[in-house]
Amino acid sequence: MYSKDKIYYGQRILAFPYVSIIFMKNNSKYLYLIAGANGSGKSTLASELIPEEKLEFLNADEIAKEICPENISSVSISAGKEFYKRLDSCFDQGISFAIETTLSGKNHIKTISRAKAFGYKVILIYISVDTPDLCINRIKVRVEKGGHYVPDEDVIRRFYRCRENFWNKYKDLVDDWAVFYNGAIQFTLLHKSNKVKGISKLTKIGNRAVKKAQEENRFLGLPNVYCVHGETVFR
């Protein structure tokens, strides 16, 4: 029982004014929300998207690792405070950045509102998979690779909340959104807003990230986890 997620260790890439090759057509400021359930592949996508777009990256789990790598759950409050300090810093500097989130709560409704008030364009990327079981098994592989564990009950709860919140609360608040499927060998576009651009480039980045994660697992002797006809399979 394993996960194919490649661990992105969240080093803070120094950001600078930059014109995005995906969505940015001018010198606008952009906020990317990379959303999905635990184990869906958010960090896998981020591992390629962040350096490609030269974005600052905010991830509460990675901040917790910086504070206490032995037990990130013990410093969740401290990590949350530091997350919002860094969020404020991004807004103050006016730099483009990305946030990784499960969207299981409503806290980023305020983040989106603040971003728009500061003149940011907000892009929401939702990574979808078939079942919580797929996520749980991918997380098990992540742990084998040194990544952090997430209790099964949390994975299941966040899986359904994330999907519900994306469709019913978040997608209509952002400027552009796209849904990608990451339950198979390829990273595939499922849905997008009518005005979103640069999808072809983003799909290529996602597939490059997934391929690297799959190759890493094979190199380490760990299975990749997919969904085939509704069943979780290990290959």
Image (tube, grey):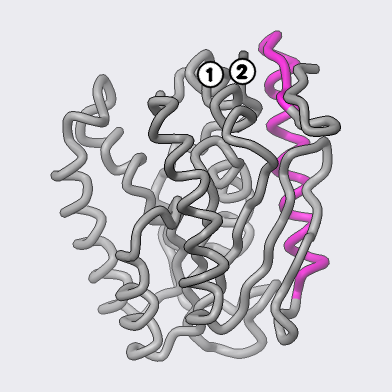
Q: Amino acid at mark 2?
A: Tyr
- Tag 1: Cα neighbours inside 10 Å, few (<14), some, or many (≥20)? many
Q: Examine the residues drawn in magenta and state their main secondary structure.
A: helix
Residue at the disc numbered 1:
140
Q: Is residue 17 above or below residue 149?
A: below
Residue 57 picture location, percent across and down: 43, 56
The residues bearing labels 2 and 1 have C-alpha atoms spaced at a distance of 4 Å
Residue 232: x percent and y percent?
73, 24
Q: Are marks 2 and 1 in contact (CB under 8 Å)?
A: yes
The magenta span reads 198-225
Locate the C terminus by quadrant. top right
Membership of 174 in magenta stretch: no
With 4 as the anchor, is 50 left or right in this view? Answer: left
Q: Which residue is mark 2?
A: 2
The quarter of the rendered structure image containing the N terminus is: top right
- Which residue shows up at 64% across the image and 30% down it? 134
209 inside magenta stretch: yes
Q: Which mark is residue 164?
A: none
Name the residue: 34% across, 88% down.
118
Judged left or right of residue 200, residue 136 is left
Which of these two is toward me, 167 or 74?
A: 167
Task: Give residue 179's position: percent from left, percent from top.
Answer: 68, 62
Q: Is residue 81 left or right of residue 151?
A: left
Q: Amino acid at mark 1?
A: Lys
- Mark 2: which secondary structure? loop
**Which residue is at 39% across, 35% downward?**
154
Does the rendering let one see residue 148? Answer: no
Res 126 → quadrant: bottom right
Q: Quadrant of residue 97?
A: bottom left
Query: Residue 29 placed where, x, y %?
Result: 47, 82
